[in-house]
Amino acid sequence: KKNWKFWYNTLLPNFLHFNPSRLYLQTTGKYINKLKPKAAPGLDKITASHLVVLSDVWITHLASIMNSCTALGYYPDIWKIGRLVTIPKSGVDPTEITAHRPLTLSSVMGKLYEMAILHRLKRRTEELIPRWQYGFRQHSSTLGVMESFRSRRGCVQWCAAVFLDVRKAYDKVWHPALYHKLSAAGSALLPLIKSYLDNRLIRVQFQHTL
């Protein structure tokens, strides 16, 4: 009960009013180096290889652009357009629609910005998630649950667990309800999240025609 009150009264308000810190040359360069060098580009044709060879001056400009996006709560529309290509499956009739595996290629610039925001959000959200939660967390799995059961059984302690399995959970989130919850809570991240999720497009590429 005390942990819940601390979370609700202290940690939650701090998170809702959390504004990601500014990006600088060194941190932006680290994120660029984490991009997959051979990943296919989005519609803008910018690849990770292009960003890796940027000089410090241009990386500083790039960091400034992303800082402005965060301050304005704006996610550029061009980064929200995906290029969908199909990969044929082996051993299947190519005339069947199920014989092709869809793959959406998104903007590398968008991936870089997402990586920067996500990294800083993860550090803050770790303060909110109870240590006994094993789902939806990095470096955590059901093995942790089993180990917790095993240790408590050996100590003759009571142990309860709640299991939740939601198929395509991200795809099924109702965005208007999400915006309403964040707005009611006074979240400073609402404009950026709304801009990130709204008006996303996918353009289908068939052979060499888009």
Image (cartoon, rainbow, N blue to C red):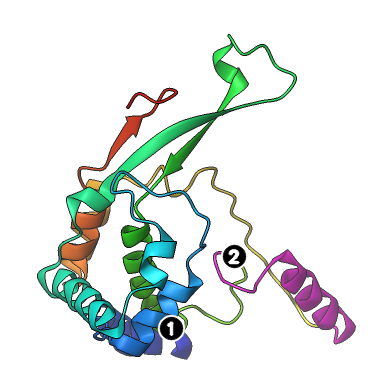
Question: Residue at position x 44%, y 40% from top?
Answer: 104
Q: Locate residue 134: give its quadrant.
A: bottom right
Hey, which residue is sitting farthest left in the picture?
A: 72
Task: Please state the horizontal and vertical placement of residue 97, each as a whole percent of the image.
Answer: 54, 15
Task: Please state the horizontal and vertical placement of residue 51, each as a whole percent of the image.
Answer: 36, 68
Q: Give the range drawn in magenta.
A: 135-156
Q: Which of marks 2 and 1 is nearer the N terminus?
A: 1
Task: Please state the horizontal and vertical placement of residue 148, each as a whole percent of the image.
Answer: 76, 77
- The image shows residue 116, relative to residue 80, as above or below, that is below
Q: Find disc 2 in the rendering and name its residue.
A: 135
The secondary structure type at the circle numbered 1 is: helix
Query: Does residue 136 belong to the magenta stretch?
Result: yes
The secondary structure type at the circle numbered 2 is: loop
- The image shows residue 161, relative to residue 93, as above or below, that is below
10 Å crowding of disc 1: few (<14), some (14-19), many (20+):
few
Give the spatial CA distance, label 2 vs label 1: 17 Å
Query: Does residue 28 belong to the magenta stretch?
Result: no
Amino acid carrying mark 1 in the image: Arg
Q: Find disc 1 in the rendering and name its residue.
A: 123
Relative placement, left or right, of 80 versus 149 is left
Task: Please state the horizontal and vertical placement of residue 133, each as a whole percent of the image.
Answer: 58, 73
